[in-house]
Image: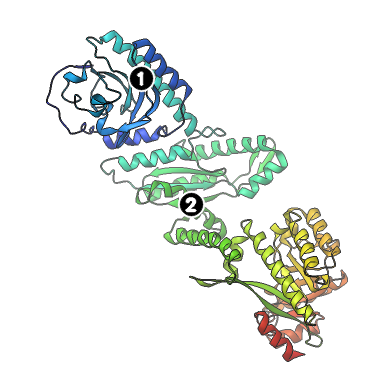
Amino acid sequence: MLLENTGHAYCAAPAALPDDEGARLAALQGYCVLDTLPDKSCDQITELARTLFGVEIALISLVDEDRQWFKSRAGLSAQETPRSMSFCAHAILARGSLVVLDTHQDGRFRNNPLVTAAPRIRFYAGALLRSSQGHALGTLCLIDPRPREHFGPAEMARLEQLACMVMERLEQLRNRGYTDHVTGLPNRARLMEVLRARAHVKGDTGLPCAALGVDICSREYLFDMVKALGWDYAESFLVQVSRALCEALDYQPVYRVTTTTFVFLHEGTAAQRQEHIANVRQQFVQALEIHGIPHQLDIAIGVLPAVDDIAGSDVVRSLLTVIDVGREEGICPRQFESVHAENQRNAFWLLSALPMAFNSSDELSLHYQPKVRLRDSSCVGVEALIRWHHPVLGNISPAIFIALAEKTAQIRQITAWVVRHAVVQAAAWHARGHRVPIAINTSARDFESDDILRLLAAQLKQHAVPPGLIEIEFTESAMASNPAVVRQRVQAIRELGVKVAIDDFGSGFSNLSYLKSIPADIMKIDRSFISRLVENEADQVIVPSIIHLAHQLGFSVVAEGVESEQTARILHHLGCDFAQGYAIARPMPAEELEEWLGMVR
């Protein structure tokens, strides 16, 4: 305890910085209490301190980098004051607590603005708030506009007891905010604390610190589990998997950072890191049985070789990125590369720019690819294909932005945009005496609700377009999630008078059982079977089988990706009804299509 009551000359400089200032600030940030809402328990302690010691003001003061912030305050309206004026900034330099009986007699404080103006401090007593590692975070302090002649050891002991109660509460708040409530493991916020603390560690151990991200299963797998068995079962699953993961990592700290992703920090050699990865993979080779149900987990592992080389806030983002890349590429483990982050940023940028394109009059457009009857080469319709010309990036490939949009709800916006513009174009051609049916592509997400059915019906009515001039194409993957519901919605579209086509047949779900009852008119054979038809013997067997099967089930057949006259002749010989591809015509704007139609008629 320091009982200061001496008359030093006033020094304008603020309190010196503690020797452990970097680690102290990291510890303070680790409690995650700065700038948080009031806490009832803390407020009760400050009010008790004010009453017990008969002072006007009691504060829980936390000394931040350039301010002191009050987690709780009794008798004071200010939420914070500059550190340069802070009495507590002097207190954290003391080995014990700090008492100033009369600020007018203390050279450090007599000219302090908090003394010369409101709240006109004359008496101050501060008991240190120390972290479990011994860092002084701030004080529980007493302030009064009246000086005192005495503040003895017994009174300071009581104040220090209250300070211990404050620290116990801060620990509770930290643990509540830093522990995953399902698995009991430290969470992402705790990982951020650890990474921030590393940034303040002085010296170099010479050992690189790597971060391993382990995604225990795909998000779809967990969501299907929840839908089938409920959240209670899914939480039991997560608990048991997390225990198995901790066992594989020798019970070193493992952090749960997303629903299915866990992170482990490893400080050691690359060989030691590979040993940990091998242990994790071996742990999940066998199916994990939970409540009698076996789960063969498809884990993915991402590696950041040196976390100290990147900002702590980027660690989790980078791990999630490389885990997704590894899943897509089928590589486990996958090591992070800077290009992964660049691709992720570009993808996010494109998805962010897409809504603006919908509101622009000239960014998005439709091109139309003709579909012809193989028997006589007459055009029987066109397929509407969206194009995006960005004002800065230029033409953006549909293969890029459609694939990105299909992972989000934005694909529905794209489909809605295409429906509106295709119906308008069909109406314009119809009004000029051209009967040109337009096929519109849809995605599996479009059939998750009745929105597309309502939009299609409204657009046909608004523009007085005969339903036969519009065709809806859906892929086999749309049937995979909920075949009965999708079948019902497709049937409702067909009942409008709109034709329906199964697109890219053979490339996805390929469950022949649904073909028996699917309400479609047309089957489009995926281009992967058509592009090598001339030279590939397997395709020469598969394609006629598909054509025969489709005809037997009542479908007309369209071959996609026809790129040579020879391919077209073979398809005609095999009995295929229609074809589209570069050998016939490339996608083109409406004006060019009208010229093309004029030449072939």
In the image shown, does 91 or 10 lie closer to the viewer? 10
Q: Is residue 463 left or right of residue 232?
A: right
Q: Residue at x 42, y 51 (%)?
A: 304
Q: Residue at x 85, y 73 (%)?
A: 551
Q: Residue at x 44, y 62 (%)?
A: 339
Q: Position of residue 360 (x, y in %)?
A: 58, 67
In the image shown, does 45 or 75 lie closer to the viewer? 75
- Identify the residue position indicated by label 2 in the image: 302
Q: Position of residue 298 (x, y in %)?
A: 60, 50
Amino acid carrying mark 2 in the image: Gly
Marks 1 & 2, CB-CB < 8 Å contact: no
Q: Residue at x 19, y 24 (%)?
A: 110
- The secondary structure type at the circle numbered 1 is strand
Amino acid carrying mark 1 in the image: Ala
Q: What is the quadrant of the C terminus in the image?
A: bottom right
Mark 1 or mark 2, earlier in chain: 1
Q: Quadrant of residue 107?
A: top left
In the image shown, does 75 or 235 lie closer to the viewer? 75
Mark 2 burial class by Cα count in 10 Å: few <14, some 14-19, many 20+: many
Q: Quadrant of residue 288?
A: top right
Above or below, 150 against 397 in this view is above
Q: What is the quadrant of the N terminus in the image?
A: top left
- Colouring: rainbow
Q: Is residue 505 visible to the viewer in this orientation of the structure?
A: no
- Identify the residue position indicated by label 1 in the image: 58
Mark 1 burial class by Cα count in 10 Å: few <14, some 14-19, many 20+: many
Q: Position of residue 7 (x, y in %)?
A: 13, 20
Q: Quadrant of residue 169?
A: top left
Cα gap from disc 1 to disc 2, whole angstroms: 50 Å
